[in-house]
Image: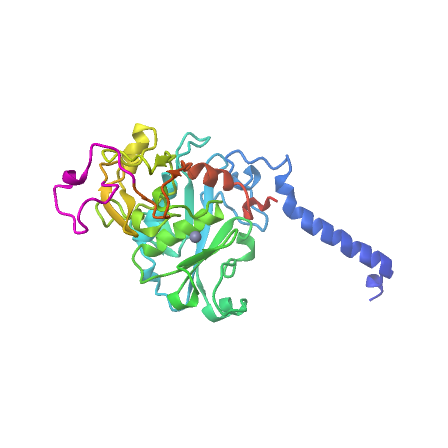
């Protein structure tokens, strides 16, 4: 093998060059040359017709456009999950939650297009992009010293890695300590008996990936305490990130005729879909509509009977509505969607930074 007998120093140099080129290849899209008109982290040069992402994936064919925000998520299931259990209702909830994102794209259309590869076709649309499959729970857990499945790109083909986030849907016991866990790019969720519950957790984990964290129950978002996620009909989940700023509220002087507010009519109309979380004797109570009237000081009986109006006082009341043991001014909570929309352009997708 004479042709391969480089002098050692040259061989080291060649290896070094190969390494440098290899690591720079991933950094290239963040240069000025990699224009990303829609700010979704997928450069225009990947999203335009006839082009391909690094690795050879044709994302235009999969529905991506350079002038509309696109998010690609593949779901992979551990072997004990029957695919019919990953419900169409759950997939539809995720799709429409992103489709309703408060953003107008360069193409004039609203929302974020969530390209979900769940390996199944539903009445509403196809969620099959040809990559979703089965993974071995034992093998996925093998990578982890604690024997539990953690978020990873396990199950995602190498050519999809620059484009897709990976979600592992696992049997409950394979995920330790939480209903779901996310890292910067990927997540794992428990199926939790099927239905659409898993999609709520999936939306929560995607929130972490897109830069938002947990908050108080009065945030009225999928990142906050579970109970308030129920709409005022008591059964329908409101699966969304916070889309309006929740105004500050003073526990020392609460107006029971009013609840939480956003400062805009559209925001308040949206907020009225929720119950107002209030701490009564250390327990979160959900009775009044978030935009009021609300029995802030819990003067109503625990087994509240109508008319609710009899517990609404006309004078300001004082109450520890967040249950932290202190009467304080609760600060305003900013909308979360702006962070999510900004963060779409970062992270592994598009291989930026
Ligand atoms: Zn969380």
User: Which quadrant of the structure image shows residue 171?
Assistant: bottom left
Q: Is residue 85 left or right of residue 308?
A: right
Residue at x-position 13% and y-position 47%: 305
Q: Which residues are magenta?
A: 295-318
User: Where is the C terminus found, in terms of image quarters?
Assistant: top right
Q: Is residue 150 above or below residue 266?
A: below
Task: Tell which of 78 and 53 is nearer to you.
Answer: 78
Is residue 333 visible in this depiction of the protein?
A: yes
Q: Is residue 309 magenta?
A: yes
Q: Position of residue 295 (x, y in %)?
A: 22, 41
Residue at x-position 82% and y-position 67%: 1
Q: Position of residue 341 (x, y in %)?
A: 47, 38
User: Which quadrant of the structure image shows residue 99?
Assistant: top left
Colour scheme employed for the rendering of this structure: rainbow
Is residue 220 visible in this depiction of the protein?
A: no
Task: Tell which of 263 and 101 is nearer to you.
Answer: 263
Q: Is residue 194 above or below residue 92?
A: below
Dominant secondary structure of the residues highlighted in magenta in the image:
loop
Give the residue furthest to the left: 306
The number of numbered discs placed on residues in the rendered structure image is 0
Q: Position of residue 32 (x, y in %)?
A: 64, 34
């Amino acid at each position: 093998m004479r042709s391969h007998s480089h002098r050692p120093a040259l061989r080291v140099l060649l290896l070094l060059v190969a390494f440098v080129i290899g690591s720079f290849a991933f950094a290239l899209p963040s240069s000025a040359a990699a224009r990303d008109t829609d700010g979704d982290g997928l450069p225009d040069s990947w999203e335009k017709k006839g082009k391909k992402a690094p690795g050879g994936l044709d994302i235009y064919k999969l529905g991506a456009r350079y002038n509309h925000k696109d998010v690609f998520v593949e779901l992979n299931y551990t072997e004990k999950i029957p695919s019919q259990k990953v419900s169409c209702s759950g997939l539809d909830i995720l799709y429409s939650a992103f489709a309703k994102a408060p953003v107008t794209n360069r193409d004039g259309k609203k929302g974020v297009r969530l390209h979900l590869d769940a390996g199944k076709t539903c009445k509403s649309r196809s969620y099959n992009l040809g990559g979703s499959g089965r993974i071995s729970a034992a093998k996925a857990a093998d990578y982890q010293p604690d024997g539990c499945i953690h978020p990873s790109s396990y199950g995602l083909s190498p050519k999809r890695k620059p484009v897709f986030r990976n979600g592992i849907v696992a049997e409950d016991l394979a995920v330790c300590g939480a209903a779901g866990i996310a890292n910067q790019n990927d997540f794992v969720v428990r199926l939790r008996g099927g239905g659409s519950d898993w999609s709520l957790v999936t939306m929560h984990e995607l929130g972490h990936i897109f830069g938002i964290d947990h908050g108080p129950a009065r945030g009225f978002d999928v990142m906050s305490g579970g109970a308030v996620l129920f709409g005022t009909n008591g059964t329908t989940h409101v699966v969304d990130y916070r889309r309006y700023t929740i105004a500050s509220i003073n526990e020392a002087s609460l107006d029971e005729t009013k609840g939480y507010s956003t400062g805009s009519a559209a925001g308040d109309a949206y907020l009225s879909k929720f119950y107002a979380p209030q701490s009564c004797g250390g327990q979160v109570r959900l009775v009044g509509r978030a935009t009021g009237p609300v029995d802030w000081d819990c003067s109503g009986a625990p087994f509240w009977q109508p008319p609710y109006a009899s517990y609404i006082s006309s004078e300001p009341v004082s109450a520890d509505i967040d249950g932290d043991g202190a009467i304080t001014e609760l600060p305003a909570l900013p909308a979360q969607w702006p962070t999510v929309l900004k963060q779409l352009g970062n992270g592994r997708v598009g291989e930026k930074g």
